[in-house]
């Protein structure tokens, strides 16, 4: 029996990548998982099928985030799937990155869209979730290491900085209800957000040289960390941001010969 038996979870952006790994791990621990996605229904169906094939419980919920009515759509689907059960765990994972949204080229529309999906949506999803969440629940936000190392994708990095701030503030506000709020901050992780890891091997090699453990993160590396924060073992941890990155940029790489 897993440590989340009889719990329920909503994982946003769980059709692919890190979100899929989070959903899969929470379901393996016994939670009933709402697998949220935006448009890729076949990927969401694959996530749900893999969970069910492994003996877990999951259902898919479609809601494009960053558009009017997004939170209503999401919570209508969630309510149908939970069928009267409260929510125990919310993982705000869905996000988008616009690689062209640099200081030279970003448009106001690029800026607004990334903030709508990466910041406004998790804020209002959380606000709505609190109405159906049991006291003692768990909120885990997925941020990024780009909050502390610099990249040209300034707008994306700013959205993740906002998420880190959200976590600390919420942790304080929700303490009286026994709800913990933590932030998991991946480094470079092999998902469709980083297809260049496969298409640009030399660039990938340079990146691995900056990681103490010498490789890209895998989605399960992040999913396992999120599952810890969702578990009772993490009951006394709140308001924290934890870097889950294999030791990224700990110092200059060791010279090789
Ligand atoms: N990969 C990395 O190296 C890395 C590093 C640091 C932080 N992160 C963070 O980790 C999280 C997951 O990233 P990932 O690499 O797994 O991303 P991914 O492979 O691109 O998957 C993104 C997920 O978010 C959903 N999504 C995106 N935009 C959406 C929208 N407008 N409405 C609804 N759903 C939407 C997608 O749904 P569909 O399948 O329906 O499109 C998909 O499930 C993100 O918060 C990201 O910022 C990733």
Image (cartoon, rainbow, N blue to C red):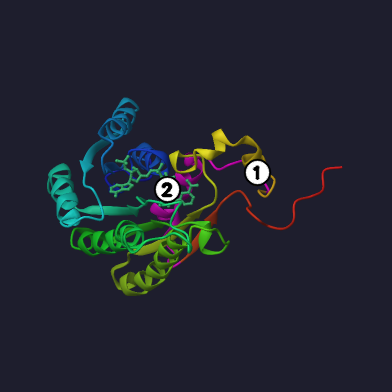
Q: Nearer the viewer, residue 110 or 156?
A: 110
Q: Which mark is residue 12?
A: none
Mark 1 surroundings within 10 Å by alpha-carbon count, few (fewer than 14), some (14 through 19), many (20 or more): many
Q: Is residue 85 visible?
A: no
In the rendered image, the residue lying farthest to the front is 104
Q: Nearer the viewer, residue 138 or 189?
A: 189
Q: Is residue 202 left or right of residue 85?
A: right
Q: Work out whether 12 lies above or below 112.
A: above
Q: Nearer the viewer, mark 1 or mark 2?
A: 1
Rendered residue at 55%/64% (across/down): 148
Choose the circle earlier in sequence order: 1 or 2.
1
Q: Report the Cα–Cα distance between label 1 and label 2.
A: 25 Å
Instruction: List x then y, in percent, for residue 168.
Output: 41, 71
Instruction: List x then y, in percent, for residue 125.
Output: 25, 59
Q: Work out whether 102 lies above or below 45.
A: below
Q: Is residue 47 visible?
A: yes
Q: Which residue is mark 2?
A: 227
User: Does the Cβ of the disc 1 residue fall within 8 Å of ligand 1?
Assistant: no
Q: Secondary structure at mark 1?
A: helix
Looking at the rendering, which quadrant does residue 234 occupy?
A: bottom left
Q: Secondary structure at mark 2?
A: helix
Residue numbers of the magenta segment: 212-239
Q: Which mark is residue 208?
A: 1
Looking at the rendering, which quadrant does residue 151 occupy?
A: bottom right
How many numbered marks appear? 2
Is residue 197 on the magenta stretch? no
Rendered residue at 21%/47% (across/down): 63
Is residue 238 on the magenta stretch? yes
């Amino acid at each position: 029996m897993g440590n989340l038996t009889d719990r329920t979870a909503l994982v946003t952006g769980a059709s692919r990548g890190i979100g899929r790994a989070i959903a899969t791990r929470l379901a393996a621990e016994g939670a009933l998982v709402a697998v949220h996605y935006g448009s890729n229904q076949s990927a969401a169906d694959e996530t749900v099928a893999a969970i069910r094939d492994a003996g877990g419980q999951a259902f898919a919920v479609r809601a494009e985030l960053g558009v009017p009515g997004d939170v209503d759509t999401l919570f209508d689907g969630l309510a149908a799937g939970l069928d009267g059960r409260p929510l125990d765990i919310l993982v705000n994972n869905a996000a988008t990155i616009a690689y062209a949204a640099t200081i030279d080229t970003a448009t106001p529309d690029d800026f607004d869209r990334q903030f709508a999906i990466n910041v406004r949506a998790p804020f209002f999803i959380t606000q709505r979730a609190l109405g159906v969440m049991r006291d003692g629940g768990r909120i885990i936000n997925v941020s990024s290491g780009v909050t502390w190392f610099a990249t040209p994708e300034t707008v994306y990095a700013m959205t993740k900085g906002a998420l880190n701030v959200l976590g600390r503030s919420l942790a304080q506000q929700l303490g009286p209800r026994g709800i913990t709020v933590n932030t998991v901050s991946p480094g470079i992780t092999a998902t469709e957000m980083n297809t260049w890891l496969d298409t640009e091997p030399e660039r990938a090699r340079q990146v691995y040289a900056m990681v103490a453990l010498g490789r890209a993160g895998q989605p399960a590396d992040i999913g396992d960390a999120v599952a810890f924060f969702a578990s009772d073992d993490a009951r006394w941890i709140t308001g924290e941001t934890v870097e889950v990155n294999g030791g990224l940029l700990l110092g200059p790489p060791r010279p090789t010969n």
